[in-house]
């Protein structure tokens, strides 16, 4: 699995965890991880290509 695929998978898993209505501490942790993943995806993204297929 490529780094890009791995990041997208992690992002999807974290978004699923957010949908489960976590407590405030877990929510903050998930949001911080999502921000890091978004930054990494932007760095890996070819210019002009979409990051993921939005649901």
Image (spheres, grey):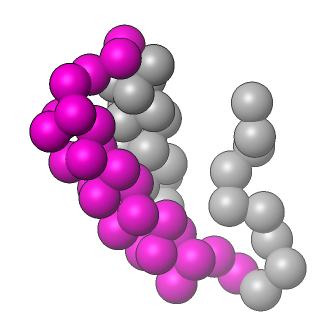
**Residue toward you, 9 or 1:** 9
Q: Residue at x 68, y 61 (%)?
A: 51
Magenta residues? 20-46
**Residue 9 spot, x, y in % from top left:** 43, 40
Q: Residue at x 75, y 30 (%)?
A: 55
Residue furthest right as drawn: 48
Question: Taking 6 as reference, is 20 above or below it?
Answer: above
53 relative position to 1: left or right: right
**Residue toward you, 19 or 49:** 19
Q: Residue at x 39, y 27 (%)?
A: 18
Residue 36 picture quarter: bottom left
Question: Taking 13 as reference, is 41 above or below it?
Answer: below
**Residue 31 spot, x, y in % from top left:** 35, 50
Residue furthest front as drawn: 24
Can residue 42 be spotted in the picture? yes
Can residue 3 be spotted in the picture? no
């Amino acid at each position: 699995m490529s780094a890009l695929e791995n990041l997208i998978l992690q992002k999807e898993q974290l978004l699923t965890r957010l949908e489960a209505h976590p407590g405030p501490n877990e929510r903050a942790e998930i949001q911080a991880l999502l921000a890091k993943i978004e930054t990494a995806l932007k760095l890996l993204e070819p210019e002009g290509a979409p990051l993921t297929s939005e649901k």
